[in-house]
Image (cartoon, helix red, strand yellow):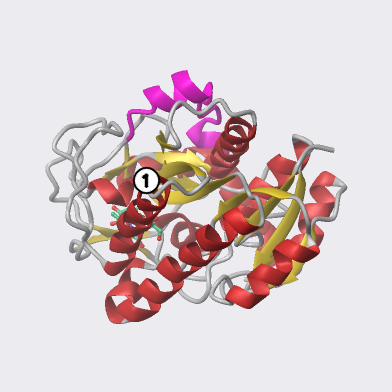
Amino acid sequence: MKERILVTGGTGYIGSHTVVELQKSGYEVVIIDNLSNSRADVVDSIEKISGIRPAFEVLDCLDYEGLDKLFTKYVGIKAIIHFAASKAVGESVEKPLLYYRNNLESLINLLDLMPKHKVDGIVFSSSCTVYGQPDELPVTEHAPIKKAESPYGNTKQICEEIVRDVVTSGAPVNAVLLRYFNPIGAHPTALIGELPNGVPQNLIPYLTQTAIGIREQLSVFGDDYNTPDGSCIRDFINVVDLAKAHVIAIDRILTKKQKEQVEVFNIGTGRGLSVLELINAFETATGVKLNYKIVGRRAGDIEQVWADPTIANNVLGWRAEETIEDTLLSAWNWQLKLREKGIQ
Ligand code: UD1
């Protein structure tokens, strides 16, 4: 058994897939989650996939005392992967304080407790949202950080700065900031996947819910952008590929391979796909016809963004491997499984 890793938000979408990959690599995982956007039975599903039940505690990262006790209970935690955060862009505009409190204070609490409990490093879930609409595409890690379009986006920028400032202060903290592009898909077993609360805001859960008949029609937000087919372009990254990047980041921290105390990587495929191309790919991959219509633009959307993942490819030795067809099929199989279980 390798080292003990704390995964905050470990029953969530990306967190659960990452727990499975960590376990596959031999790490011992402790999950904490406040279950605000996930279910406790995800732990059972993780166990079904990996054969190992991770330790799990219901705990909010805002609870400083609780975190302190957790590190004492699970002695020897070597690194943290910090997923736990609020992530709905629209909600963050309505409730900015909730977002600043949740996302900033959680990170602050963890960083504060790391030296005391001799935790070597932290992997932080950042986002391509920090680039806004990049001037050059594909976007590299050296692109300027643009003024955030939403409080949610701003929390990602500020969290990155908090990590850098703590490291600059001389704290014994090593960090990897992973800037995700658009994570989609589900585990090939269809035992874990994305479980949005209420009406989905993101494209893929809305799309699969429409395909299965929960929603009547998918609205495509805008076909008058300056792109080949007029719809927005994104870099859709398979969630298992994304999960694997976290394991490599943890290995890198724990084997002291980092060149700098804070490293940042784009985690994307390097390919941009438009919303309409994605719909086409879904129909081809699944054979299911999708009911959609073009509507007006959604406020705050970026026109086009996709990653230059060269640094992650070369430095981490990580690469997105899954095809978009397999990824979309996995999202569809997950939606079918949810219906089977009577969840959605
Ligand atoms: C946004 C954030 C990202 C965040 C993610 C998680 C920005 C720039 N991006 O991604 O940082 O991690 O949310 O919540 O803030 N679309 C439709 N119809 C729909 C839903 C979406 O056409 O019903 C389109 C959108 O207009 C967009 C694309 O699909 O062009 C992707 O949208 P979405 O899945 O919401 O992700 P982002 O907005 O790219």
Image quadrant of ligand 1 equals bottom left
Snapshot quadrant of residue 305: top left
The crowding category of the residue bearing disc 1, from other C-alpha atoms within 10 Å (few below 14, some 14 to 19, many at least 20), is few
For ligand 1, tell me if the residue under mark 1 lies within 8 Å: no
- Residue extending furthest top? 314
The residue stretch that appears in magenta: 307-326
Give the residue type at disc 1.
Thr
- Residue extending furthest right? 51
Q: Disc 1 marks which residue?
A: 168
Above or below, 112 relative to 306:
below
Above or below, 117 relative to 277:
below
Q: Is residue 4 visible?
A: yes
Q: Is residue 193 visible?
A: no
Q: Residue at x 39, y 24 (%)?
A: 311
Say if the magenta span includes residue 316.
yes
The reply, left or right, for residue 168 in relation to residue 118 is: left
The spot of residue 95 in percent (x, y) is 33, 81
The spot of residue 316 in percent (x, y) is 51, 25
The reply, left or right, for residue 148 in relation to residue 278 is: left
Q: Secondary structure at mark 1?
A: helix
Above or below, 72 relative to 334:
below
Of residues 9 and 297, which is closer to you in this image?
9
Say if the magenta span includes residue 134.
no
| Quadrant location of the C terminus in the rendered image | bottom right
The reply, left or right, for residue 128 in relation to residue 14 is: left
The spot of residue 150 in percent (x, y) is 25, 65
Q: Residue at x 45, y 62 (%)?
A: 206
Snapshot quadrant of residue 340: bottom right
| Quadrant location of the N terminus in the rendered image | top right
Snapshot quadrant of residue 42: bottom right
The reply, left or right, for residue 158 in relation to residue 13 is: left
